[in-house]
Image (spheres, rainbow, N blue to C red):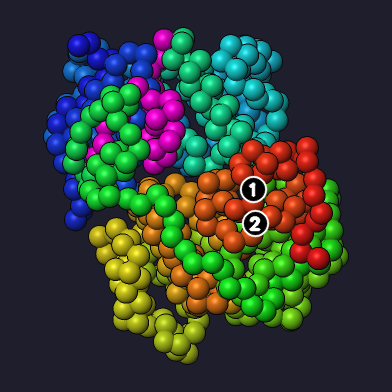
Amino acid sequence: MDYVIEMLNIRKEFPGVVANDDVTIQLKKGEIHALLGENGAGKSTLMNVLFGLYQPDKGEIRIKGEKVNITDPNVANNLGIGMVHQHFMLVQPFTVTQNIILGSEPTKNGKINIKKAEKEVQALSDKYGLKVDAGAKISDISVGMQQRVEILKTLYRGTDILILDEPTAVLTPQEITELIEIMNSLIAEGKSIILITHKLKEIMRVCDRCTVIRKGKGINTLDVVNTNVDELSSLMVGREISFELKKKPANPKGKVLQVHNLVVRDSRKVDMLKGLNLEVHAGEIVGIAGVDGNGQSELVEAITGLTKSESGSIQLNNKNIKKLSPRKVTESGVAHIPQDRHKFGLVLDFPIGENMILQTYYQKPFSKNKVLNYKRIDEKANKLIEEYDIRTPSTYTPARSLSGGNQQKAIISREVDRSPDLLIASQPTRGLDVGAIEFIHKKLIEERDKGRAVLLVSFELDEILDVSDRIAVIFDGKIVADLKPEETNEQELGLLMAGSKKEKEGGD
């Protein structure tokens, strides 16, 4: 068998951690090959070795049968390897074109020929169906378009082999469908793709083969046509996973959150929330379903004090919290799992132990007379690390060094541990493997059963339908439907989310 890439018996160690232990993966020309494993299993590390960001301690890499030494990403690019990272590597103030050509700029008389570059980018975009606005700033475009820019960056450099690291983690269902079409068109052009993902349904839908790694070791490589979701999940986590979420019927009590006629504007002075109404009771999970950009982020930021609203009211336990600072909102009994763990959830260069007390560091027992008590901080962090199975060498490890899933579990542990009256969970399982998703869903239901009010914002319709007790559909800044999960389905929700079917606004 001829392979375009062979990573043979790769070992990669970091202080105190063996990330990859004798792992082998072989990629055929023209295939989409899934790399599957739990959070922290070593998937991204293995691909960072292939892309030249890390050097292997043992093993070898072959390109079309020839042994190569990939010392840095430039060498990888020259060998036809491109990587789209889970967290995009884009310069926000730059335009789409400027980001794509960065480091490979066409010049004329010693100056960058931006007009030529824009034409080349547009031609590449049209060829592969990667719809982008070549002149738009990165800060002004959607997450889905940013990802297309990352893919175009690799294609602009002549990439034949693409590594996509959790490419659907931040996409809406519609954008995921578009990405799958793009991947198929790339394969039709003769490209080969390694897809790092936790999403088993996507593997079954789009991949040819799948290599499973667990705790840094290679477990098996399978033809996708000969396997199923249950087998893949068991190989990934080493135990059977229950995809059926068992929960008692909700027992809602008093109103915890009341949002009435809320109007919120964005930085361009455009109304993103247009008189929105919403209620969440103690002992229930309300899921917000909607296409990204319809006001979900503004709603969460207004409730948590991160954004000021123009008009309307936000009440927590019958107390107006609309004008409170984020700290005062937190102290009032609101916990927030933010949708972007890097921007809003963690201080990446702080130790993971300190990140776990970001909301309470100024309170006893973690500080006294403005001096931190590191013994107490370590005790709390170690307790949460054990309870939530957060994989880290120690409490002193920088948050940046943890896998995305373990970073997310650290945030969730911090917020849930404070026993809030209202828990806002925004994309809480983004980037998590099936075992971690199962754990987080159980935690949300446990919080509900303790009498907490839970507001769940998710682009995953499966998650909304499985976890929620009520579903509020948001479209164009308003709640357009208030439904029970057992009385609706993905098709109806999709129509409501697209604004093609409207019902009586919920929360009145």
Q: Amino acid at mark 1?
A: Thr
Residue 488's label in the rendered image is 1
- Residue 243 drawn at (x, y percent): 40, 49
Across and down, in percent, residue 369 comes to 47, 90
Q: Is residue 307 above or below residue 437?
A: below
For residue 433, side relative to residue 277 (left or right): left
Tell me whether the residue at label 2 lies in contact with that at label 1, contact meaning CB atoms closer than 8 angstroms: yes
| Amino acid bearing label 2 | Lys
Q: Is residue 195 magenta?
A: yes
Q: Is residue 170 magenta?
A: no
Identify the element where label 1 is drawn.
loop
Estimate the x, y position of residue 482 in percent, counting from the top left. Answer: 72, 56
From this view, report whether residue 170 is shown above or below residue 470: above
Q: Quadrant of residue 139?
A: top right
Residue at the image position 17 percent from the left and 27 percent from the top: 8
- Give, as a single range, the part of the protein colored magenta: 190-213
Residue identifier under label 2: 484
Q: Nearer the viewer, residue 413 or 396?
A: 413
